Structures are given as structure tokens and as C-alpha cells.
């Protein structure tokens, strides 16, 4: 159960990282050789490329709030498969969201000397309003 809890925590830390735009903390969620696939950023390889993309993709004055739930984790030794649903609200300070999207996250996690980290992340857009 400890492994499952730590991996579930990665999804929460990822949401906070994205919402707070704390790109310098990406290493606390991802491995250095991470591969990320999503509709917004296509395919990215390596932590440096991912962080550079996240910095460049920021939209002035736009904020996000990620609400991630329904995490399912299957641990196999020092590797795990995990998935979750996420709703993302896009808004500007003091205003109602101008865009909302529903995502499905599918990830591969590995145990490292620093704890569990995501080695691969695949995001699928389920819907957008």
C-alpha cells in the first residue's frame, strides 16, 4: 500500500506543479529520461525538453486548476502502471473558467533512489468545453 500511496501522490504533485508553474520542481515528479505524450505538446523526451516546453507554453495571465481523481495503480516490483482522470479549469484571476477539459492520464512509474517518479506519461483529451 505504501508504494500505491506514493504513486498516487505523484498525480497530486503533478497537478500542483502545473497549477503553480513550478517547473524547477519537475524532477520531483518525473525521471530525467521521461517521455511525455499529449494533445497539447505532442511528444517530448527528457526532463529538460519537457521543462522548456512548459515554460514556453505559458499563456500570460492564464491560470489552471487540475482536479485529478480515480487513480488506479498496479505495482510490479520497482515499476508500476497508473492511470487517473483529470478535469482542468483554465481561468484568469477573479474570473470564471473560460475553458474546461476532461483528461485521461496513463503513466508508467519507476522506483528511483529519490522515490517513485513518472518515466512515461500519456494524456488523452476526453472532452473540452
Image (cartoon, grey):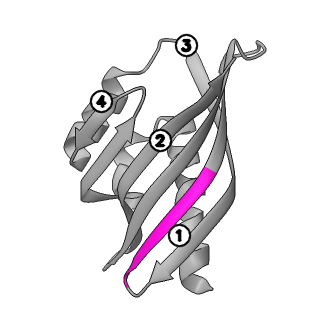
Residue with the mark numbered 4 = 53
User: Range of the magenta residues?
Assistant: 78-84
Does label 2 or label 4 sit earlier along the sequence?
4
In the picture, measured across the screen, residue 118 lies left or right of residue 100, that is left
- Circle 1 sits on which residue? 7
- Could you tell which of marks 2 and 3 lies nearer the N-terminus? 3
Residue 18, percent across and down?
51, 38
Magenta-drawn stretch contains 70: no
Where is 98 relative to 21, above or below?
A: above
The front one of 104 and 16 is 104
Q: Who's the residue at 29% across and 29% down the image? A: 53
Q: Dot 2 corresponds to which residue?
A: 123
Which marked residue is nearer to the observer: mark 1 or mark 2? Answer: 2
User: Are circles 2 and 3 on residues that touch, CB within 8 Å?
Assistant: no
Task: Estimate the spatial distance between the alpha carbons at disc 2 and disc 4, rounded to whole Å.
Answer: 15 Å
Residue 5 position, x and y percent, is 61, 75
Label 1: how many residues lie within 10 Å, few (<14), some (14-19) or many (20+)? many
Residue 94: x and y in percent read 76, 15
Determine contact: label 3, label 1, CB under 8 Å. no
Amino acid at each position: 500500500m505504501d508504494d500505491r500511496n506514493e504513486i498516487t501522490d505523484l498525480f497530486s504533485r503533478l497537478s500542483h506543479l502545473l497549477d503553480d508553474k513550478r517547473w524547477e520542481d519537475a524532477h520531483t515528479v518525473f525521471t530525467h529520461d521521461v517521455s511525455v505524450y499529449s494533445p497539447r505538446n505532442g511528444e517530448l523526451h527528457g526532463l529538460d525538453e519537457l521543462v522548456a516546453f512548459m515554460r514556453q507554453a505559458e499563456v500570460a495571465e492564464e491560470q489552471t486548476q487540475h482536479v485529478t481523481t480515480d487513480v488506479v495503480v498496479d505495482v510490479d516490483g520497482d515499476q508500476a502502471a497508473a492511470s487517473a482522470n483529470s478535469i482542468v479549469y483554465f481561468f484568469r484571476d477573479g474570473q470564471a473558467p473560460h475553458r474546461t477539459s476532461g483528461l485521461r492520464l496513463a503513466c508508467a512509474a519507476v522506483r528511483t533512489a529519490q522515490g517513485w517518479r513518472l518515466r512515461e506519461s500519456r494524456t488523452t483529451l476526453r472532452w473540452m468545453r
